[in-house]
Image: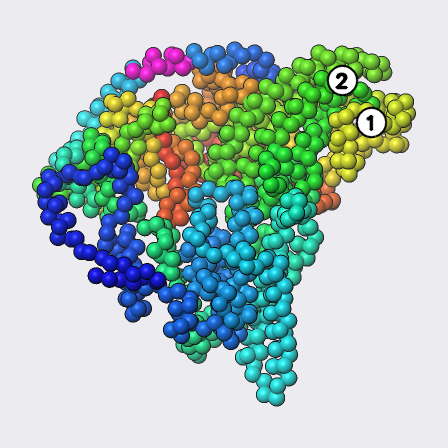
Amino acid sequence: MTSEAAIPNGLDHQVDSCLTTNDKNSVCDDQENQSATKLDNDKELILKLDNLLLDDQNDPEIYFHSYKSENEMSSIMTLISGTLSEPYSIYTYRYFIHNWPDLCFLCSNRQTNELIGAIVSKLDLHKKVLRRGYIAMLAINKEYRRKKIASKLVLMSIREMIRRGCDEIVLEAEVNNDAALNLYENLGFLREKRLYRYYLNGVDAYRLKLWLK
Amino acid sequence: MQETIGDTTYNWTDVTTEFADLCRNLPVGEVLRDEDFTLFEAMTALELMDPKMDGGMSIKNHFHEQKHGNRTLTLPQLIEKKLVKTSSLTPTELIHLFDQLLSTFHMWLDGHSLALTLYTCVYVHDIPIIEDYPLRTICYTFVKLIDYIRERILLKAGLFEEEDFSGTLTYNFPFYRDTIKDQTCLSDLKKCEDELNKRLRSLKHESELNQSEINATQQLIHRIRFLRLFFGVTLRFNEANEKTNEQTYLNSEEILKNLKQIDELLLLIRPSHVVEDETTTSPDNAEMIIPISSLADIARSFDPYYNYRQLPPAFNRFIRQLILPSCVYTFLGSICQQLRRMLEVNDKRTLKQAFEFFLEYSTNEKPSLFIRSLLLLSYLPSVQGCLLSSRKIFGQISFAEQVKYEMRLFIVPPLLTLKYIAIDQETINYGENFFQRACVPFSNLFYSLCNNRARTREKLSNLLDEFSVLQDESEKLDQWLHKYFLQHILQANLSTLNAQTLLLIEKTSYFFQFILHWTLLIMEYYLLMGFDLSLYSKRELYDVYFYFAQIILFTHINVYKTSTNLLNTTIPMLIQTNQKHQQISKNQTSNIFVQQFSSLVQQHSNDDPLMDSANDSNPGQKKNKRKNLNGLLSTNTDHHEQEVALIHGHFAMSTAMHRCLKALELERRLRFSSTDANYFLRDEIRYRHRFLPFANLCAPPYMPHADFLHIQNLSDNRYTPKELYQDAINNFSQAKTYFESYLNRLTASKQQTLNRTFTTNFTSLADVESYIRIAKTNCVVLKLLLSGHKPEMKIDFDFTLHAHYPTLKL
């Protein structure tokens, strides 16, 4: 009993063991084509991102901006340490934000100038060959949740990373953090691996990755 | 200002004002740094006086409570100040200390640091000055126990990663290696036990019975006996003969006997429970209540902050309180259970059986690092200076021998089955080279399976690279054998052969098929583990199931067909040839390879496909009734029967899944789409990365994404949703049938030999039962969809019944 009688799977010709190296060559050709179209892909993605960010009607109450000076550091730290479970020293914030200020995006209240949301990320060379973006922290004030602020901040960060030529973007998220997992997965991040007991509280995490190349 | 901590006195100078003044010169946002000390290094810094980060702040509070200033007192200092007792301890005090030490042991096994577990006991830092004999013995034993597990088991197995175990740091703690030996501890414990038994007898003979003292003494005896047995059992694993440094044979019978005794003791031990209120009682006397007042003399015996200054700042997992004894004893009971179950590995006679056991054990028991290490070391005991691949299975069977035997079982290559042929030296070299090289990935396979599950999957992907090299090697060996071996040797010896059989033998790439078979097993397990770890997103399911079914399983079905065909066709001929030449060769096996594993063949002659039956006079006519590896009576055609049923079941399930996923997509019944505006992952890129571990393999051949799409097109895109639904329904029904027939055969076989695990390849009994239910449910839902039920409604995927295949939900 097989299902081949109903609908052929089209694979009958492919079964025998590999005795040629043809397949390996075709992989190489593929890679060459990929680098040629790399730039086009990036431009396309950035265009897509720009459209997305402009399309959304912004809530007049809030405005987005990028990091300007150390004066903002204290409010960033308060916001993030108040929402995330892992403790970070000021040096951790400084490491990311001083080295990659253009990858730190903020969202504030127009009236009060209160900081509502922040994303902290970096872009580095990984193992000397790969340009890897990393989203270190993302936090939104409790009262302003479910307004797509987080998605916008992530999109801004991704756009900047792509503009600078990024091969992949990674981050870690707790296995129970459904809000974060949904947010990123809807953007194309996949769960690359599971990290056993990753957090201080013994909880597992997923390494989420968005492959761009 | 001066400050004394322990034995050292410090002279501090306060520079706060100067520092603050200098800082005023820095503009906003400027930080001072050195060339070698950048912001990256600074991340590990801590903020002084921060209550979470600065260890000194916690200690400060702690010592403030203790009213002893900033000091950690050493044991001699504590004794001098009469803050802790080291002689004439009462049974109750000893019981409490024992239970606390046991709790630290448990927490250490769980991955916590030595500094926060065993060595928070002040006694352990200076055991020789303890006068009390039982206390001294107990302390030494716990130290030796942990030391042995660390050195001989965890470090030798080498399975741990950062997240499992922090035991590589020893903080210069004393392990008393030169002071006392393991065996001495055992005999000392026995002495303690005997003395306490004497004491107990005299207590029972007193005119006025002190019942509480009698109970306490009895409970202490149980604990000491338990510790002696438990330590004894531990010492039996990965024992090394000290003179020769060679592996001693694992005596599982003795271990099982001891485990039984431990179980009995655990029933008798009443875990202690310290209470403030003296009137508290334990429900049904299950626990031994100890009022805190009776522990006054040993109140300072445990100090969680004792080693605090040695820990890195902001150290994770600080332990504020030890786990309660009642939980610890329950945990120990389950360790014994797991050990008992683990010892079943000793009956696994083939690589396949061992593989199935390892898989089943790690899925069902979810073993800790300790048990996983024991499992690996029981199967492949360590030997000084010896690579994993050179180890002997159970310390007895050479790995290369086992691999050859496995090949013989799977596909009966003439090289490994014809007893009375002379093989030239070059062929021997080629062959032996290949078999030795094969040991590396196969032994790594077992190593990989003993890691925690998340790491196992990673390691399996690396293993596939090793197998791809092995695929190349096997092809070379097959080519060599075709050219030189078969033509010259075979024809000379096999004049009775019919042309067809000869052609089959000449056409077959024996070793390639074998390696391909195992490669596919690993690919299948790797893919399914992705489901177990919840790694796949809903948008990937179509590609994953399609790849699984049409590329991996499809190839595997053909491999099984080849193997079954070979076994059926060539076995009678091979037996015949051996018999024919037996007398001429005077029963002297000339085939060196067959000679090597002849003991394995003899030991397991019932399982051997070439079982020489003396009463087999008409090989062509009679059906050869043998028992196959499953202990089931079978006929000639029943090779790999269970495996084939399961693989067809999986094939049908996965095919059904991708057909209905395509149909759902066409009917717009999915909640998502890869063409969403804000979806930034391209299918082609995802395909390449997700299936990267498969890219280097010779077979199944790597397919570029364009070709993959083409095949998917041919397979699914030409049909209407209704046709796809119908085919999915057919496939789910077929799957159900295959799985049910598998179950029937299993339950019909009355023989449940020790060798049987209930996992065939990577599929367990429980899996199959779930798959059947899923197939049934999905058939129902698909029939509704087929009839056009609620066209607007989207479908959800529910993986709660089983991680591998979802039930469709309206």
Residue at mark 1: B589
Q: Which mark is residue B424?
A: 2
Q: Nearer the viewer, residue A207 or A177?
A: A207
Circle 2 chain: B
Quadrant in which the N terminus of chain B is drawn: bottom left
Query: Residue A189 shows which numbered tag?
Result: none
Does dot 2 land on a helix, a strand or a loop? Answer: loop
Residue at point 52%, 41% (across, down): B158
Mark 1 Cα within 10 Å, few/some/many (few <14, many 20+)? Answer: some
Q: Is residue B177 visible?
A: yes
Residue stretch rendered in magenta on the structure: A30-39
Q: Residue at x 65, y 30 (%)?
A: B644
* Residue found at x 51% / y 37%: B456
Q: Is residue B384 left or right of residue B78?
A: right
Query: How much space separates mark 1 and mark 2, taking CA atoms?
Result: 15 Å
Q: Mark 1 is on which residue type?
A: Thr
- Left or right, B692 with reference to A66: right
Look at 31% across and 17% down and name the residue there.
A41
Can residue B652 be seen by looking at this rendering?
no
